[in-house]
Image: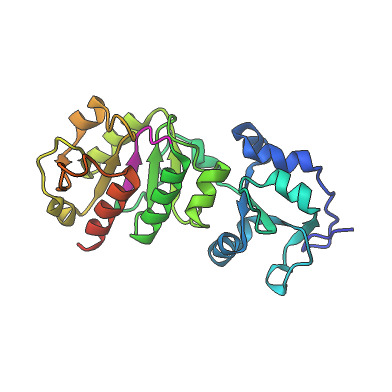
Amino acid sequence: MILLPDNKPLIPKPIKWYKNLATKKGRLLAESFLIEGNKSIKQIINNNPDDVIEIISTEKLPSFYHKYSSHLVTDSQLHSICSAKTPQGVIAVVRFPLDTYSDQLPDNPGNKILLLEDVQDPGNVGTLIRTAVAFGFSGIILTEKCADPLSPKCVQSTVGTVLSLWIRRTSHYLSLIDKLKQNRYSLIAADLTGTENPSVLQSQSKLLLALGNEASGLSDSVLSASTYRLNIPIIREKAESLNVATCGAICMYLSYQA
């Protein structure tokens, strides 16, 4: 019998329950999501230890994991749960903040926020989350057409940093922009046709950085609301544009240098 830290028995869940966490509906019902691989799980445990619910593994776990309840599974069972083609042998079930899908800002949103409008590739979204954490951003606003930040592929790309800032995924992002601008945030939009130099990122005490869809960029609604439209100078004769995650990394790095 598996025991929880308070010595209460944990009723083993069927494999189907874990597989359902690959869907948004399953995650919402369980109020949890999956983190795959030792590196990512250790990142979560180091920064958010109380959010880890259970460890799933194919073999006996090292002492680092012993404070958590565990569920031993076969290799084939683990493979059926994992999103990775080559599972690393361990998965954590992690509790997610219930306000992830809220349209309300935190009481203290912080001084640097990232806005992602319809960024659809989960690898890009996950990489941008990880980069935002690395360069001191407090939170991220995502539109509903963005990849779900708690989907397996996105979480895997964050490498365990997904709980290190606040996240809001909502269709009401334009109203959140208005609220932030009323609180003296500068909305800086990354735009191929923009005229502002990247140095504008270094003069903002409150920054809302907007990045758009991989193919179409930012909408007219966001561009018209922007305080500045930023253009990163590149050799366009050789490369027409940058990947959105690369563009975001450059902008966030420059804002960090302020």
- 174 left or right, relative to 191: right
- The quarter holding residue 4 reads bottom right
Magenta stretch holds residue 114: yes
Instruction: From this view, report whether residue 160 is shown above or below residue 227.
Output: below
Instruction: From this view, report whether residue 139 is shown above or below residue 118.
Output: below
The residue nearer to you, when weighing 84 against 167, is 84
Which quadrant holds the C terminus?
bottom left
- 193 left or right, relative to 21: left
- 157 left or right, relative to 63: left
Q: Residue furthest front?
A: 238
Magenta stretch holds residue 152: no
Residue at 47%, 56% in the rendered image: 164
Which percent across, then down, holds residue 130? 42, 55
- The quarter holding residue 36 reads bottom right
Which percent across, then down, holds residue 250? 26, 54
Which percent across, then down, holds residue 160? 53, 57
Residue at 66%, 54% in the rendered image: 87
Q: Start and end of the magenta stretch?
A: 113-120
Residue at 42%, 50% in the rendered image: 127
